[in-house]
Structures are given as C-alpha cells and as structure tokens.
Amino acid sequence: MRLSFGGEGYALITDNSGHVLAHVEKGLIGSDVSTNPGFQAGTRGTGWPLAPNPQGQRSLFVYRPVKSPASGTPLPWVLLVEMDEEKRWRRSRR
C-alpha cells in the first residue's frame, strides 16, 4: 500500500493493539505505535489535531477507527494520516 499526499504527508493503518499493518516505509510495518496519542485517540473516534510529531515538527494529524471484518475481532483498526502543517497550508493557498 502506498498512500502519500503530494510528498507532504503519509497514511498508516494499525491493528487494535497499535502495531503498524501498512506504512509507506516498509521497515516500520510491525512497529508498535500504541503510545502515539493519535493512535490512542483513533481507537475512540475521529479527530484532526495540530500537534508536534515525534521529530518535533508541527503537523496536522487525522485519525479514525476503521472496522475490519477480516480481523476476527470487533475492536477497530486505526487509520492515521500525518501532514506537515506549514506545507499543508502553503499548498492549500495556491
């Protein structure tokens, strides 16, 4: 799966325990993001906060729970999207 937003953001999907199932950087598949606030919030609902990413850059995060009938559990997966705030707003003003 390759989801990107004009080179200015990316999406990932996690299972209900916070393990990455799909990421543009294949080496991050299987990593644990359960302590990520976006993942934690995404298990409870949909949102789009502006917050620092792990590298300290201010980013727009979008998250939402995603039902997966193939997973065999009623607990949702989480779709997370991150976009650099400065680049995102610059692009939308064009």
Image (cartoon, rainbow, N blue to C red):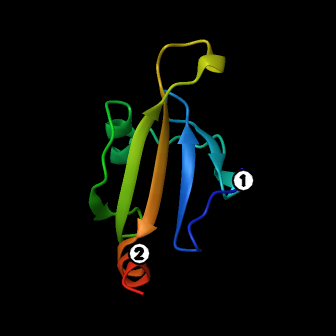
Residue at 41% across / 62% down in the picture? 54
* Residue 86 in which image quadrant: bottom left
Q: Is residue 30 above or below residue 84?
A: above
Q: Secondary structure at mark 1?
A: helix
The three-letter amino acid code for the residue at tag 1 is Lys
Number of numbered discs: 2
Instruction: Residue 38: tell me if it is visible.
Output: yes
Q: Where does residue 29 sit, x and y in percent of width and height?
A: 66, 45
Using the image as rendered, state which of residue 75 and residue 18 is in the foreground. 75
- Asked if 93 appears above or below 34 in the picture, the reply is below
Residue sitting at x 53%, y 40%: 32
Question: What whole-number distance in Å separates the C-alpha atoms at marks 1 and 2?
Answer: 24 Å
The percent coordinates of residue 62 (x first, y second) are 39, 52
Q: Which residue is mark 2?
A: 88
Q: Residue at x 27, y 56 (%)?
A: 49
Which residue type carries mark 2? Arg
At x 70%, y 56%, the residue is 2
Disc 1 crowd rating (10 Å Cα; few below 14, some 14-19, many 20+) is few
Q: Horizontal placement of 30 versus 51: left or right? A: right
Q: Give the x, y percent position of residue 59.
A: 36, 67
Q: Residue 36: in sight, yes or no? A: no
Q: Is residue 42 left or right of residue 28?
A: left
Residue for badge 1: 26
Please state, as top left, top right, bottom left or bottom right, where the C terminus lies in the image.
bottom left
**Of 32 and 92, the residue lying toward us:** 92
Tag in front: 1 or 2? 2
Quadrant in which residue 57 is drawn: bottom left
- Position above or below: 70 against 66: above
Q: Which mark is residue 69?
A: none
* Furthest-front residue in this view: 94
